[in-house]
């Protein structure tokens, strides 16, 4: 506890201290420390991007078809270097690399990490919030570490998190079966400090906010169209908030409530966002904060994102996630507008 008469906390709960107390796993402490160090480096680069001419394209396109920004390349190198040299990783998957990176034998550990080093980087030149997303798996005991160790569903994800770079730098993490916790970077000591214990989506659904790229509405199925129509024309209409950086949109949903969607549609039958380093980690955070993380109607059924088994390291998945109140609206529209049987009923808390 901080001394109430002193502005400086003499017993500050840092990220490393929290992870050790929560897991008693020295390797996981080293891993999260490496990720946190990468996030500090990325935050510094983002902050200085204008002065050091880091805006603009790098002249390449990544494996998922996105044009790489200079900061994409730099952020990826920061993450890769930090994780490879942590001594606790076996396999690394990045949005910016076509193939998984197998860590050299002498530096290899037990963890496999999938990450998007700079989510929302298309917004970076106009100074909109961006972030880093990651999921962590533990390789099978008999494995030396290969792609199969990370192509697993959310039940095998031992840790998930994201870092948002904005007016403050916040790191949000959760461990399998645990609560969601937030840490804010204190620049005076260079450490992430535990500031948001046991984060929860408001149990009543929170603020009435819907977040979706309505530029794709002509491609949506009827249930998604009807859901958005309901949000816009309810007795108390919802507010529309869509940043275009998943980290920013999910962070707001986690704190305020509402719903975020990037559904499957006629243009993108599998959705647009990537399963391993966007869908699974954000779904784990949302579910363990008391929300719902669904694919919507996908592969002839409605299912949890965490039940999906990735078919490749860069495969995509549709996303409908947020408060129970608002995801239930979408489920009800699948039943009403499309006649889909066995639509889940979400229990109230």
Image: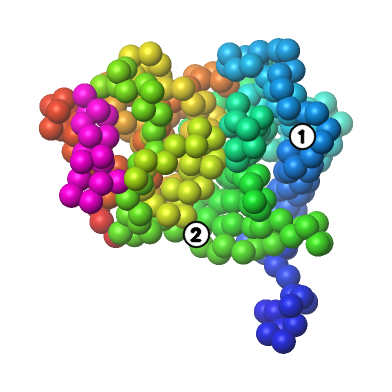
Res 200 → quadrant: bottom left
Give the residue drawn at x 46%, y 22%: 272
Q: Position of residue 103 (x, y in %)?
A: 78, 27
Q: Nearer the viewer, residue 123 or 267?
A: 123
**Nearest-to-viewer mark from 2 and 1:** 1
Dominant secondary structure of the magenta stretch? helix
Q: Is residue 154 magenta?
A: no
Q: Nearer the viewer, residue 120 or 238?
A: 238
Q: Is residue 224 magenta?
A: yes
The residue that appears at 66% across and 26% down in the rendered structure is 94
Q: Nearer the viewer, residue 223 or 159?
A: 223
Q: Which residues are magenta?
A: 222-238
Q: Residue at x 76, y 46 (%)?
A: 40
Where is 243 relative to 19, above or below? above
The residue beneath circle 1 is 50
Q: Residue 252: x percent and y percent?
A: 48, 49
Q: Is residue 4 visible?
A: yes
Q: Which residue is mark 2?
A: 199
Query: Left or right: 22 with respect to 311?
Result: right
Give me the C-alpha separation between circle 2 and circle 1: 33 Å
- Where residue 344 appears, x then y in whole percent? 23, 40
Q: Quadrant of the C terminus?
A: bottom left
Residue 15 in the image: above or below residue 235: below
């Amino acid at each position: 506890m901080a001394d109430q008469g002193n502005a400086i906390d003499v017993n500050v709960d840092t990220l490393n201290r929290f992870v050790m107390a929560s897991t008693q796993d020295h390797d996981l402490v080293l891993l999260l420390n490496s990720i946190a160090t990468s996030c500090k480096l990325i935050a510094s680069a983002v902050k200085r991007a204008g002065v050091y001419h880091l805006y603009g394209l790098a002249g390449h396109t990544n494996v998922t078809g996105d044009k790489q920004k200079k900061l994409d390349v730099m952020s990826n190198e920061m993450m890769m270097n930090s994780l490879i040299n942590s001594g606790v990783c076996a396999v690394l998957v990045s949005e910016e690399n076509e193939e998984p990176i197998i860590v050299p034998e002498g530096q290899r550990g037990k963890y496999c990490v999938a990450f998007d080093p700079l989510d929302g980087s298309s917004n970076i030149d106009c100074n909109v919030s961006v972030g880093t997303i990651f999921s962590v798996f533990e390789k099978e005991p008999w494995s030396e570490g290969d792609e199969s160790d990370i192509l697993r569903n959310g039940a095998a994800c031992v840790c998930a998190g994201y870092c948002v770079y904005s007016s403050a730098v916040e790191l949000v993490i959760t461990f399998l079966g645990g609560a969601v916790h937030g840490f804010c970077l204190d620049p005076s000591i260079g450490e992430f400090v535990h500031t948001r214990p046991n984060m929860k989506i408001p149990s009543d659904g929170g603020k009435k906010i819907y977040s979706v790229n309505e530029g794709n509405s002509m491609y949506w199925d009827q249930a998604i169209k009807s859901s958005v129509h309901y949000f816009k024309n309810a007795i108390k209409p919802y507010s529309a908030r869509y940043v275009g950086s998943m980290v920013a949109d999910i962070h707001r949903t986690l704190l305020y409530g509402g719903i975020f969607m990037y559904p499957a549609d006629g243009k993108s039958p599998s959705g647009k966002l990537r399963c391993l380093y966007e869908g699974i980690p954000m779904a784990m955070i949302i579910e363990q904060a008391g929300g719902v993380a669904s694919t919507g109607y996908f592969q002839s059924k409605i299912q949890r994102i965490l039940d999906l088994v990735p078919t490749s390291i860069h495969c995509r998945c549709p996303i409908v996630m947020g408060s129970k109140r608002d995801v239930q609206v979408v489920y009800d529209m699948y039943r009403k507008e499309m006649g889909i049987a066995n639509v889940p009923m979400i229990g109230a808390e």
